[in-house]
Amino acid sequence: MIKSVLIKNFILIDELFLEFDNGFNVLTGETGAGKSIILKAIDTALGARVSKDVIFDKTKPALIELTFDHSNKDLKNLSKFELYNQTVVSREIGLNSQKCRINGALVNLDALKELREYLVDIHSQNQSYTYVSPKYHIDLLDAYCMSADNDFTLNIEQYKKNYNELCEVSKKLTFLKENNSKNLQEMDFLRFQLNEIDTAQVYENEEEDLNSELEVLSNIQTLKELTWGIYYSLGADGGVNDVLGKMNSSLSNATNFDKKLEEVQNAFIEAHENLKYCSNYLREYSQNLEDNPQRLNEVNERLSLILKLKRKYGDIFETREKIANQLDEIQNNFGSLSELEKKEERLLATVQKLSGELSVVRKKCAKDLSSLIVKELRKLELSKAEFEIFIKEKKLDAKGFDDVEFLITTNVSSALAPLAKVASGGEISRVMLAIKTVFAHVDMVSSIIFDEIDTGISGKASNAVADAISNLANDIQVFAITHQPIIAARANAHFVVTKSQDDVTKVCVKKMETESERLEAIASLASGEVNNISVSFAKELLKP
């Protein structure tokens, strides 16, 4: 339950501290007095979206601090928040930043919103008119199913996981199929490029090898003359080799006289042999050199082809690898198309199966929930009302193939019809009270807040609503803004909201502590002034 609220510098509230009771807490006051500001502050502290316009004095931040008492609540589902028997939730709103805290620890807005789901249910008039929309009805039914069937939550999470995966696969399939024609054209072009490179059969360093060969083929005669001239000088009669042979013979004779010359002789012999080798090699090389115009043309053509490929592709080998990878990727996509189609088929079967299982639970719970709501409607002076949760099949979406709509009739002579088309303003308020009462008992949130739940009702209906809220307050803490003295008289704690218009407009709240204060508040609510008649009426309402 909400034990207390501290509000500072928020909208028209300078500073306000309120302590609440366990049961039924009611806020009354003139229209425009600022009653809804209190509820808006509580909503804001629990993560509602607000702008910096809520700051009353722009020189300092706004602050809302809620204190919760969990002494009568099972905290098992709230263990991740590290809560104790008492929890303080605060939100500070500045011009440039906001700070949210749970028990002093900084948290984000999502943490506040998640905590709120376990602790407080705030119901406003906007929510009443929103909830008549069929698109929200499946969410209400699912909330009931989760509380009634232990496996439903797990199944719906599994369904959403598989459905999201199915959507991703279908999206990818659509993309691949739409791009099939483009991919086929690209594959043909890539194959052409790859074939052009592979047909050329260029090998690493071939260009360098060909350039070297071209240099030789282009200078055959010069090479022949140079090498033959060297050979002739070395190996012809009377040439260098003959002279060296005579010198070697002389050195051999000298060595016979002085063994120290052996090392020189050996070096000389080795040099002589090397020159003989050079002479023979150059002779053969020169004799084998021949003009070869055909080969010269072949080399030039080959170099021309390589140059053409380089101009077109840049680095031939890097480009070939890139083209091959691109081709493999596209071909893999075509291969994965078949796999994706099979996967889509498997996922669709799984999703349909899970959706069918969800539908079975929904239909059963829809009957139970409808019966519970009808019982509550009977208590709210809608004795002829019938309520049915109608489920029909639709195209699969994120919630399954169930299309859920709340149908109601409030007159015995009328057939069931959509809630939005049948219920009047006062009937909507009572229908929503019935729904909220059922869900409050199921979910057992700590507190439920009604912002003007009595709109459009009077007489016996007001008394019935008062009974319903009073009974609900026996189980959980209830807050209500009301203009009905019959409802206000049932409260355990009565707060009167007023607006002062002195130098600055401010909202003030006073708790009616004494019996006379409550009597005057009810009398004023009944007639707008405190007189003998209104006081007498208030006394009747406050009788136990």
Image (cartoon, rainbow, N blue to C red):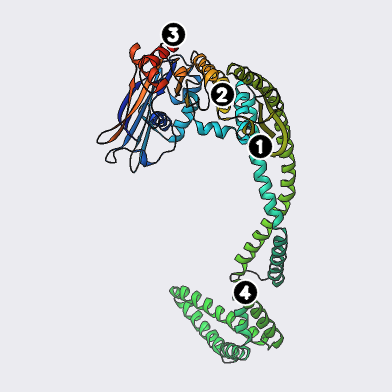
Inspect the image, locate mark 1, and give the three-letter code of the amino acid beneath it: Asn
Location of residue 520 in the rendering, given as x and y in whole percent from the top left corner: 35, 16
Q: Position of residue 421 (x, y in %)?
A: 64, 34
Q: Measured along the vertical axis of the image, is residue 181 above or below residue 509?
A: below
Indicate which disc, 4 or 3, sits on the residue closer to the N terminus.
Answer: 4
Query: Which of disc 2 and disc 1 is earlier in sequence?
Result: 1
Tags 1 and 2 touching, CB below 8 Å: no
Q: The residue under label 3 is which amino acid type?
A: Lys
Residue named by callout 1: 162
Q: Secondary structure at mark 4?
A: helix
Point out the tag, 1 or 3, that comes first from the N-terminus. Answer: 1
Q: Tell me which label, 1 or 4, sits earlier in the chain.
A: 1
CB of mark 3 within 8 Å of CB of mark 2?
no
Q: CA distance from mark 3 to mark 2?
A: 25 Å
Quadrant the N terminus occupies:
top left
User: On the image, numbered disc 2 is attached to which residue?
Assistant: 430
Q: In which image quadrant can residue 377 be found?
A: top right
| Between marks 4 and 3 in the image, the one whose residue lies nearer the viewer | 3
